[in-house]
Image (cartoon, rainbow, N blue to C red):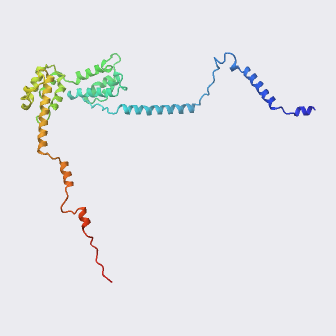
């Protein structure tokens, strides 16, 4: 009987009840689920990565960052032209050099947030005596002296102007604006483009500017100024009147050329295509022409 009780297998209901009792007891004894453990769970320890895996992830991250940096740099520099080299021998090229640097800084604002970046970028485009002048300040700086032109971009521009610019820039601009020729075979807009380069640099009033332009423009424009409706007492009104008269003159020249050639060359070409050639047979002529067949000998 004892062996029969020992060999008797438990019923499924008894097995299920046994599992439920064991699970409840283990849950109550688990320290993680003790009172307060739900609000303050025990920290889980993270596996420490191996040095090889860490180095590989760091290398991939650096490569990804470099690729994105190159893409941003190429996109940012698109359309931005680097300034021309400045050797210091020609004062006229100094203004153009500073202007080109300003344009490049505007196009690449992310790279030139600090004045010191702008200064050393501009120094890298100096050559000749201009570069030789700044070499001692860069290669052998004096620790007891602080030069503002190496820390401030306006001070650097002022240093360039004082050293390699014109001694009397206003006088040079006045001499240049007086010698601008009016293009008799061109348009007035080309003259005023050159005129505007020096107009803002000199301190002339409207009367002096009008007198200078009136002495330069051709008679075909000067004779019609008395019939204009613009305010010629101001220089801007005088300038608009001159440009309008000049544009009307060149428009009449173009209209006269069009009257001499009423038919456009493309129209002549189309007419020549549509006109049949009398020496060439048409499609109908070819259909009406009998087909000549070679004669055969009768047997």
Residue 53 placement, left or right of 156? right
Residue 74 vs residue 162, the one in the foreground: 74
Q: Which quarter of the rendering shows the N terminus?
A: top right
Q: Residue at x 30, y 27 (%)?
A: 122
Q: Does the image show residue 287?
A: yes
Question: Foreground residue, 100 or 153?
Answer: 100
Closer to us: 140 or 79: 79
Q: Quadrant of residue 202?
A: top left
Q: Nearer the viewer, residue 53 or 291?
A: 291
Image: 279 above or below 107: below
Judge left or right: residue 61 versus residue 10. Answer: left
The answer to whether 28 is drawn above or below residue 298 in the figure is above
Measuring from the top left, give residue 231's x and y in whole percent: 12, 22
Residue 226 placement (x, y as % from top left): 7, 26
In terms of image quadrants, where is residue 55?
Answer: top right
**Count of labels in the image:** 0
Instruction: Name the quarter where the C terminus is drawn.
Output: bottom left
Residue at image x 28%, y 21%? 156
**Coordinates of residue 78 in the picture (x, y in percent):** 34, 33
Tell me if residue 176 can be seen. no
In the displayed structure image, the side of residue 251 where residue 12 appears, left or right: right
The single residue placed furthest to the bottom in the displayed view is 299
- Residue 141's place in the image compared with 248, above or below, is above
| Quadrant position of residue 50 | top right
């Amino acid at each position: 009987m004892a062996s029969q009780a020992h060999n008797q297998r438990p019923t499924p209901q008894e097995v299920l009840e046994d599992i439920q009792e064991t699970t409840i007891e283990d849950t109550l004894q688990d320290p993680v689920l003790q009172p307060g453990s739900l609000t303050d769970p025990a920290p889980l320890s993270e596996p420490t990565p191996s040095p090889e895996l860490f180095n590989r992830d760091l290398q991939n991250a650096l490569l990804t960052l470099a690729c994105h940096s190159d893409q941003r740099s190429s996109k940012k520099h698109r359309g931005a032209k680097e300034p021309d080299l400045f050797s210091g021998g020609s004062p006229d090229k100094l203004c153009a050099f500073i202007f080109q640097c300003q344009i490049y800084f505007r196009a690449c604002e992310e790279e030139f947030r600090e004045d010191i970046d702008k200064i050393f970028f501009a120094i890298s485009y100096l050559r000749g005596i201009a570069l030789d002048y700044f070499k001692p300040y860069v290669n052998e700086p004096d620790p007891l002296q602080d030069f503002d032109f190496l820390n401030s971009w306006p001070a650097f521009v002022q240093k360039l102007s004082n050293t390699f610019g014109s001694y009397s820039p206003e006088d040079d601009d006045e001499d240049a604006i007086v010698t601008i020729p009016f293009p008799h075979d061109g348009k007035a807009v080309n003259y005023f483009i050159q005129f505007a380069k020096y107009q803002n640099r000199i301190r002339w009033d409207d009367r002096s500017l009008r007198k200078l332009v009136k002495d330069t423009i051709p008679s075909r424009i000067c004779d019609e100024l008395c019939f204009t409706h613009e305010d010629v007492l101001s220089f801007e009104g005088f300038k608009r009147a001159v440009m309008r008269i000049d544009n009307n003159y060149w428009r009449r020249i173009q209209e006269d050329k069009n009257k001499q050639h009423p038919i456009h060359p493309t129209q002549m070409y189309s007419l020549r295509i549509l006109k049949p050639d009398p020496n060439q047979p048409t499609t109908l002529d070819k259909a009406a022409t009998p087909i000549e067949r070679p004669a055969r000998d009768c047997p």
